[in-house]
Amino acid sequence: MSVTFTLDGETITLDAVDPTGTVLDYLRYRLRRTGTKEGCAEGDCGACTVLVGSLNGEAIAWRAVNACIMFLPMLHGKALMTVESLAPRGQLNELQQCMAANGSSQCGFCTPGFVMSLHGRAIGAAGSDLPVEDVIAGNLCRCTGYGPIIEAGETVAEIAQDDAAAVAALQAMAAGSASGEWGNRRWFAPRTADELAELLAQYPDARMVAGATDVGLWVTKGLKNLDTVIFVGDVADLSGIEETAEGLTIGAAVRHADAHGALGRLHGDVDELWRRFAGLQVRNAGTVGGNIANGSPIGDGPPVLIALGATLNLRSKSGTRSMPLEDYFLDYGKQDRRPGEFVESVFVPRPGPDAAIHIAKLSRRFDSDISAVCGAFMLQVAGGTIASARVAFGGMAATPRRASACEAALTGQPFTEATIEAAARALEGDFEPLTDVRGSSDYRVTSACNLLRRLWLREQGETISVLEDLDG
């Protein structure tokens, strides 16, 4: 079967597609659209930013993504826009003109990526409600020319976008499930959870790919060949959010950008953590379920969800099962997912009024960076006593993990500074983190204890600046 999508309103059909061939390579080497640049090839620098759109009624819902780690089958049934799309007859659009006139381009290599991110904001793409600085957090300028770039984005804050041709093309396409072969390799793009369950029963060793923000690097950096790939990012049954008084049920295929609002309403610290969850392009591609399913010890989502008491729901052709999220992570690279199973959803209880919560991410760079330590604390305090404690960390062990000794030192004790200090001493024995480029073992342990102390200080009314996260 073919991969079919639209580019500038024109329908393109590709009959033979490498399952892990990237959109970036297709644009540059097949279409010669060389305005889209290859910088890092890992979704970090934003030089390859394009806009990808899905049909939403009579309109196109656009989102900025990194073409370097987006695989071609993921374009099936979608619309694509590149920097060349903005000036089809060589006439720069108003944003491009403003960038040029404002001196927003220095060496120029990163400029097309910035233009695409800012154009997305101006046409109301995902994340358009964010400040310019947040929208371009996933775009790096090595010439440090951010000031004029931000000014251009603020000056041209709205652009009229004519999507009539793309809407008509996508409506005519009515793309459903798809599949294809490339030599002895194969790929599938199901549209329902039932289809996904059937495919995994037939191919239990298939690699599931949602946003490719992790698996993409296996290909571009690790040069891996994946024999059977199932793309799950467009499975409708996994793409919903149910928000109730009890909490949130988030489908595994919900993108981080789409989950941000509902998660942020749980607590302000969750909102801030998700704002710093990589750059916008990664949040527009990566999914909540994917961040859990890959079991990374430094994924930002699991420690927060574990501390909040989340429950994971798994599904297969034979049925469903649930477990506390922390039980899913068994060891480095090993999760409690049986053959044929997939992550269906995660339920996050809504914190009660007596919950004392603190969540912080420590990283070498404030925006769009990997955690050295991510700490999440939720204490239930009643009558001055800590009735229960949930303390979880990422970056401290081979998996996201709760700090059991720290929790035991807190539970049932008065909520006092002395209790916090005793719990910090207990926390020192909970983990033996490694030393790597992001931080030493001593730094991680000391920082983890200091995050617990920060919770106490904030509960006493002290002002804690988020910028202090850079120093721990």
Image (cartoon, rainbow, N blue to C red):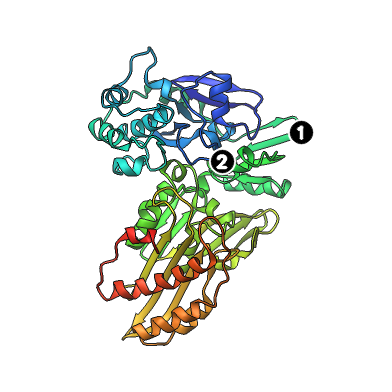
Location of residue 213 by image quarter: top right
Left or right: 406 in relation to 182:
left
Q: Residue furthest right?
A: 184
Left or right: 26 in relation to 407:
right
> Mark 1 highlights which residue?
184
Three-letter code, disc 2: Arg
Location of residue 51 by image quarter: top left
In terms of depth relative to the viewer, which is nearer, 76 or 462? 462
* Labels 1 and 2: the sequence-earlier one: 1
What mark, if any, has residue 191 been given in the picture? 2
Give how far across and how far down residue 272 sits, in percent.
Answer: 35, 56
In terms of depth relative to the viewer, which is nearer, 349 or 297? 297
In terms of depth relative to the viewer, which is nearer, 468 or 251? 468
135 up-or-down from 400: above or below: above
Distance, label 1 to label 2, CA atoms, is: 23 Å
Q: Can residue 58 be seen in this view?
A: no
Q: Is residue 242 visible?
A: yes
Instruction: Between label 1 and label 2, give the one nearer the viewer.
Output: 1
Q: What element carries label 1?
A: loop
Q: Which residue is drawn at 57% across and 44% down?
A: 232
On the rendered image, what quadrant is the C terminus found in? Answer: bottom left
Give how far across and how far down residue 270 sits, in percent.
Answer: 38, 60
Location of residue 383 by image quarter: bottom left
Q: Is mark 2 on a helix, strand or loop?
A: loop
116 up-or-down from 304: above or below: above
Left or right: 218 in relation to 137:
right
In terms of depth relative to the viewer, which is nearer, 278 or 267? 278
Three-letter code, disc 1: Asn
Q: Which residue is drawn at 68% across and 48% down?
A: 200
Q: Which residue is drawn at 35% across and 41% down?
A: 135
Q: Which residue is drawn at 70% across and 31% down?
A: 181
